[in-house]
Image: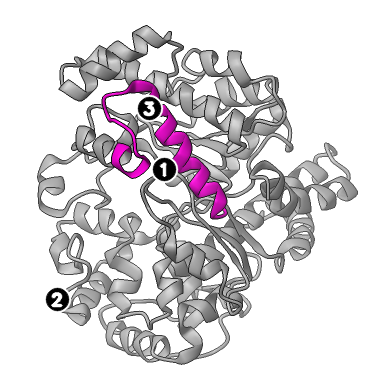
């Protein structure tokens, strides 16, 4: 196993795991400028205002269990492609909290490593293995045991615990995603621990309490009402309970509320119309159109609440969750079979923007995994409404080529100031630096091209790269 520095120059046909010029343009002049721009932001702290890391790993600060659990089990970017090749997800511990035989699962993964050539997941994993473990050879069946042993040995070290990595990664802000009834005890403990320098922020995620078609909807509303001393049958009490829980999150450091909706549909209803929908929702009598109206009314209500309490409203639409019924039944959600669908924003968001879109103190961040929507709808909308920002490329689009396409699609209409800054949106803690570095390199490459084409001065590009990396997420997420 070669254990040279992960940063080494290209060597003929040998794979350079962390080529210092990775993701930069091939043209030498443009590459030189991209390199110079990246150097200005390479060491800036990481601002991660939306993600899914479990905060308890930072509270417990226990050693990571094994290489397979660390890199594969919970990363559905990885497991979905293994599944497509015929691998059984059970081997990797999906849905079970970890694999029964971690080494056997790792060897099976190594046998399929070639599947990840050219993928974002392959890029991130190479970055992690090289930068954190000094593993610069190619993973293969022959090297699988050596990789596994090196990683297993390193994660047993005290300086590889989650808190040490939090500092090593220069993470300044890390937002989690939390149920409205979470008591946030973990966040309070982390906030008062002088050994934790980063801000670990909860995020209010009420989806299951807003969708009458979600499993257990009535039971959730009953628990919500009980927690706030109200009746689940009272529609105005339901709204008041949500406001109260939002206030609880704000008191514990939250800066945003996240909404993972199928479509960003909003609709304004009067009190009587909403009361009737609420009654039928609790009784399980809503048809598909009624359920859609309820969700649309509640997404608008969430916007109104953000206008009142200041939480940034993030909207993540356009996903067909749990597309494979058999996989969901066997492994549960977040097991790799969520699939993008087309999204429409202009008509769907108009009722919300009619009410609060002209208020600069309101911040709404709209995401998409439908590339067609960026230039057609999101950039024009964000280029007019002070409240609306374009979310960074997300999920299936948070990859080098897609991120470049999105940056080009948005910039010509909305410029650089109407974006959210990079969002890593990950459960895979060790991938956070790799993902943020990828974004900084892609943005450096994009700006360098504009300089070479005479569309920006180098001074402008130097200012912009710092702003979109650091200042923009701080401003948009009110940090």
User: Which percent across, then down, holds residue 325?
Assistant: 13, 40
Whichever of labels 3 and 2 marks the residue nearer the N terminus, that label is 2
Q: Secondary structure at mark 1?
A: loop
Tag 2 residue: 100
* Disc number lying in front (3 or 1): 3
Crowding at dot 1, Cα within 10 Å, few <14 / some 14-19 / many 20+, comes out as many
Circle 3 Cα neighbour tier, 10 Å, few/some/many (<14 / 14–19 / ≥20):
some
Q: Is residue 134 visible?
A: no
| N-term-proximal mark, 2 vs 1 | 2
| Position of residue 46 measured from the top left corner of the image (x, y, whole percent) | 63, 62
- Label of residue 205 in the image: 1
Secondary element under disc 3, as helix, strand or loop, is helix
Q: Is residue 249 magenta?
A: yes
Quadrant of the image for the N terminus? Answer: bottom left
Which numbered marker is on residue 448?
Answer: none
Q: Residue furthest front?
A: 229
Q: Which residues are magenta?
A: 225-253
Residue drawn at point x = 17 percent, y = 65 percent: 96
Q: Main secondary structure of the magenta part?
A: helix
Identify whether 453 is placed above or below 53.
above
Q: Quadrant of residue 470?
A: bottom right
The label on residue 237 is 3
């Amino acid at each position: 196993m070669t254990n040279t520095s992960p940063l080494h120059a290209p060597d003929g046909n040998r794979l350079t795991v962390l080529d210092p010029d990775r993701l930069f343009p091939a043209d030498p002049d443009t590459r030189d400028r991209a390199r110079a721009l990246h150097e200005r932001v390479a060491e800036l702290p990481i601002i991660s205002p939306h993600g899914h890391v479990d905060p308890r790993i930072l509270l417990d600060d226990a050693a990571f269990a094994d290489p397979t659990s660390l890199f594969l089990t919970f990363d559905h970017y990885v497991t979905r492609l293994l599944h497509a090749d015929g691998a059984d997800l059970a081997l990797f511990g999906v849905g079970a909290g970890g694999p029964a035989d971690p080494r056997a699962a790792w060897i099976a993964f190594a046998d399929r490593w070639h599947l990840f050539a050219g993928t974002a997941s392959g890029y991130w994993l190479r970055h992690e293995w090289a930068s954190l473990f000094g593993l610069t050879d190619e993973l293969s069946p022959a090297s699988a045991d050596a990789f596994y042993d090196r990683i297993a040995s390193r994660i047993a070290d005290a300086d590889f615990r989650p808190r040490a990595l939090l500092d090593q990664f220069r993470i300044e802000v890390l937002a989690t995603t939390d149920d409205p009834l979470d008591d946030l005890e973990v966040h309070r403990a982390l906030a008062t621990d002088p050994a934790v320098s980063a801000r670990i922020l909860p995020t209010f995620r009420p989806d299951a309490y807003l969708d009458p078609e979600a499993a257990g909807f009535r039971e959730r509303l009953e628990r919500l009402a009980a927690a706030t001393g109200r009746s689940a049958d009272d529609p105005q009490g339901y709204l008041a309970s949500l406001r109260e829980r939002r206030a609880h999150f704000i008191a514990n450091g939250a800066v945003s509320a996240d909404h993972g909706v199928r479509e960003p549909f909003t609709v304004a209803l009067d009190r009587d119309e909403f009361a009737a929908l609420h009654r039928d929702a609790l009784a399980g009598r809503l048809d598909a159109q009624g359920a859609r109206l309820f969700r649309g009314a509640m997404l608008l209500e969430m916007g109104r609440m953000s206008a009142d309490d200041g939480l940034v409203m993030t909207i993540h639409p356009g996903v067909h969750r749990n597309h494979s019924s058999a996989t969901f039944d066997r492994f549960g959600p977040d097991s790799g079979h969520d699939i993008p669908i087309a999204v429409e924003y202009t008509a769907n968001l108009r009722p919300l923007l009619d009410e609060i879109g002209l208020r600069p103190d309101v911040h709404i961040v709209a995401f998409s995994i439908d590339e067609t929507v960026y230039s057609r709808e999101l950039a024009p909308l964000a280029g007019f409404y002070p409240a609306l920002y374009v979310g960074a490329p997300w999920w299936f689009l948070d990859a080098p080529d897609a991120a470049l396409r999105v940056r080009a699609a948005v910039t010509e209409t909305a410029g650089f100031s109407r974006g959210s800054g990079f969002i890593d949106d990950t459960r895979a803690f060790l991938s956070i630096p790799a993902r943020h570095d990828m974004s900084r390199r892609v943005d450096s490459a994009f700006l360098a091209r504009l300089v070479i084409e005479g569309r920006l001065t180098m001074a402008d590009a130097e200012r912009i790269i710092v702003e979109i990396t650091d200042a923009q997420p701080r401003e948009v997420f009110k940090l």
